[in-house]
């Protein structure tokens, strides 16, 4: 009996210390992991990063640290953790390979949130699509096209090519081409165009408006007309200017050959 009690006391003294140490490692490590999660959240919030991304990143950091703490606690109990770590690594690799597309989209979304190539409400062109940015999410970006279609683009696809932001500068140039007949007076046509543009208060005086002869076509003398407007006024000015110059040419007896112009007008 005495020998049995000695064995019990020896085991308690041996494993009790290990168990207590493992519990301390677990408790202290969990407390540190929570502190790191809060710290990551505060830093990202201070940088004004998207709240969804803040929560996701801080939780990933917490889970990774907690896994490390659990492995360390098991090591204190004398459990061989080498195989356990190998299993975790293999599982992580398998999950990573299965989700590589999603992880690429997440990484691209993370970079977009940090560097802000565009914001919600901007009109952009990217991944072969163009429209107004409605949402920027972790894995996808949602655009609304001019004809009110919703286009959902994976972030990785959007960032792997050029992104054109038409809104970020605040103003845009309206590119128009008008043709007149070879028998018409160039100076008179230019004056008519200038008068139409001067009457539109939406057209900006700075940068300067360009009205120039750009091409001697097969059947017409082609003017390029390039006024600058605020982004919100782009389409209204584009359509109104096209109509008003046509009417002014008719009133001024300026001949507009057929076809009127090469319609490659950067229509965005």
Image (spheres, rainbow, N blue to C red):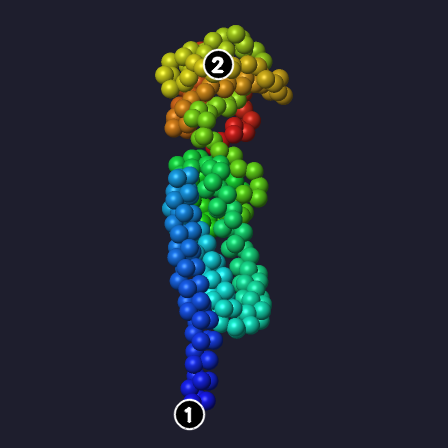
Label 1: few (<14), some or many (≥20) within 10 Å?
few
Q: Secondary structure at mark 1?
A: loop
As displayed, is residue 252 above or below residue 65? Answer: above
**Residue wearing tag 1:** 1
Foreground: 160 or 252?
160
188 left or right, relative to 121: right
Q: Residue at 58% x, 71% y: name it.
A: 83
Label 2: few (<14), some or many (≥20) within 10 Å?
few
Query: Which numbered marker is on residue 208?
Result: 2
Q: Residue furthest front?
A: 2
Question: In the rendered image, which quarter is residue 201 located in?
Answer: top left
As displayed, is residue 125 above or below residue 179? Answer: below
Confirm or deny contact between disc 2 and disc 1 (CB under 8 A): no
Q: Residue at 54% x, 19% y: name it.
A: 224
Foreground: 109 or 29?
29
Q: Secondary structure at mark 2?
A: loop
- Inspect this view and state whether residue 239 appears: no
Foreground: 113 or 264?
113
């Amino acid at each position: 009996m005495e020998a049995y009690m000695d064995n019990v006391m020896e085991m308690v003294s041996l494993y009790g210390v290990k168990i207590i140490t493992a519990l301390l490692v677990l408790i202290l490590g969990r407390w540190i992991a929570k502190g790191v999660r809060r710290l990551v959240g505060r830093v990202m919030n201070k940088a004004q990063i998207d709240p969804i991304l803040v929560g996701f990143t801080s939780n990933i950091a917490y889970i990774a640290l907690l896994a490390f703490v659990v492995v360390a606690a098991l090591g204190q109990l004398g459990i061989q953790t080498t195989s356990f770590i190998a299993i975790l690594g293999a599982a992580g690799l398998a999950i990573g390979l299965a989700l590589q597309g999603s992880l690429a989209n997440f990484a691209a979304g993370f970079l977009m949130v940090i560097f802000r190539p565009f914001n919600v409400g901007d009109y952009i062109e990217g991944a072969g699509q163009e429209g107004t940015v409605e949402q920027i999410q972790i894995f996808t970006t949602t655009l609304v096209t001019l004809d009110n279609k919703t286009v959902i683009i994976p972030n990785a696809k959007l960032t792997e090519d050029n992104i054109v932001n038409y809104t970020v500068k605040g103003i845009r140039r309206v590119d128009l081409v008008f043709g007149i007949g070879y028998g018409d007076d160039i100076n008179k046509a230019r004056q008519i165009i200038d008068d139409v543009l001067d009457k539109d208060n939406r057209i900006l005086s700075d940068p300067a408006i360009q009205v120039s002869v750009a091409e001697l076509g097969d059947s017409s003398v082609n003017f390029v007309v390039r006024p600058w407007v605020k982004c919100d006024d782009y389409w209204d000015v584009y359509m109104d200017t096209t109509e008003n110059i046509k009417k002014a040419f008719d009133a001024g007896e300026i001949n507009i050959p057929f076809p009127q112009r090469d319609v490659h007008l950067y229509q965005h």
